[in-house]
Image (cartoon, grey):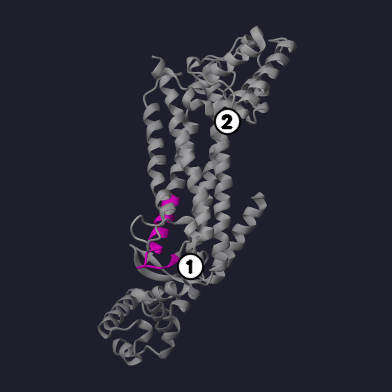
Amino acid sequence: MQAINVSIGFDQRLAAQDLMGSRAHAAMLSKQGVISSADAAAIQGGLDTIAAEIAAGTFPFREEYEDIHMNVEARLAELIGPAAGRLHTARSRNDQVAVDFRLWVKAQCERRVGQLRALQRALLAKAERHAETLMPGFTHLQPAQPVTFGHHLMAYVEMFGRDASRFSDAVVRMNESPLGAAALAGSPYPIDRFQTAEALGFDRPTANSLDSVSDRDFALEALSAATICAVHLSRLAEEIVIWTTPQFGFISLTDAFTTGSSIMPQKRNPDAAELIRAKVGRILGSLTQLTVVMKGLPLAYSKDMQEDKPPVFEAFDALDLSLAAMAGMIDDLSPNAERMAAAAGAGFSTATDLADWLVRTLDLPFRQAHHVTGQAVKRAEQLGVGLAEMPLQELQAIDPRITSDVFGVLTPEASAASRTSYGGTSPVRVREQIERWTALLAKEGL
């Protein structure tokens, strides 16, 4: 029973939040006249001593006291005597752990927003330097149309911006204090839950005592946001892995973010990217784990909910490391502009530009232009040349109205520059988005 019941091995991470909640609770009890000011002062002094012991690494975490709450209470009794027993008036471990966990998850979500902003800044800086650097855009991992490296990086700025907003939105919904809900039904004491909510940085107290102690959807929502963020990180990591291969050679990383082989001295392996790519499995696993724990629980608290913290701790640890490593890699990587530009024109990537020229200049219906372009691509394949190198007479054999003006749109540079619609890959539009995001981040002070 001791082995299966004890949780101090992992919930000691909530020590700071547990002390915060206890300080706020003691101050409120004193103000409301539930405990004397002398007892409240003794409690606050004892909690300060415990905080100092934890900071110094001398606090005696003991398994016989089961969890962080009982460990703190037991140590407080050793320090100040019977007055320590008054701290638990008008609260239960049920609302105590709920407020501790909310505080921890809330802080983690806020930290992730800061990390995501740092990653966005790294991407913006790299995108600004490469707003005109050509690369192939892909669909199905096949060359599709030329884009710029800056435009590609800005796609991830958008993704990580949404991730940051998800964490911020989650904080809005979880920013209610369960403290004072007690075991499940509230308290008969004249407590002021609004006071403790304000003292702990919450917007308000929770409105239903049953929901207060049995809800963990704040953790599930945070894990959901973490999972989506990890998916975005994994996609970028996969591209880094692909781009660093000799077959692509689009970018290079220094030894700071790569490792060597134990037997092959020529290797430079993108291990940081590969590990980030793998973290999504652990983070998604944590979301699944907590979802399964919660799915069949009746109201209110059940001991199953002790299993809520390990997956959340593990997921946020993994995401913390992944975000830091990705920001470092983005800053570290160097694009091979010549190699990317050469690849940007591969696979007849300007075929759509030929079709668009036929529509604009010859007034062909797009479907007909698409057919003519397909014939041109087939003939270019037979000749072993790109569309930009096709002899004019070959194009005129397909449609005699084609003029030499068509060659002005068949280079990768012209193709990318022509995509001037809002959000397009034209360097002009890419710089507009860089300026927009730079202003947004500056407005946030991040």
Residue range of the region highlighted in magenta in the rendering: 232-251
Closer to us: 351 or 164: 164
Residue beneath label 1, please?
335
User: Distance of mark 2 from mark 1, alpha carbons?
Assistant: 42 Å
Residue 71 in magenta?
no
Extreme residue in the top direction? 82
Where residue 214 appears, as percent x and y from the top left, is: 47, 22
Query: What's the residue at 58%, 62% (across, down)?
Result: 125
Task: Report if residue 118 is visible in the image.
Answer: yes
Where residue 264 appears, as percent x and y from the top left, is: 34, 60
Q: Residues within 10 Å of mark 2 (few under 14, many from 20)?
A: many
Query: What's the residue at 55%, 39% (across, down)?
Result: 109
Residue 349, located in which quarter of the rendered image? Answer: bottom left
Q: Residues within 10 Å of mark 1 (few under 14, many from 20)?
A: some
Instruction: Name the secondary structure under disc 1.
Output: strand
Check disc 2 and give the amino acid type.
Leu
Extreme residue in the left direction? 382
Residue beneath label 2, please?
103
Mark 2 and mark 1 lie on one chain; the one further toward the N terminus is 2
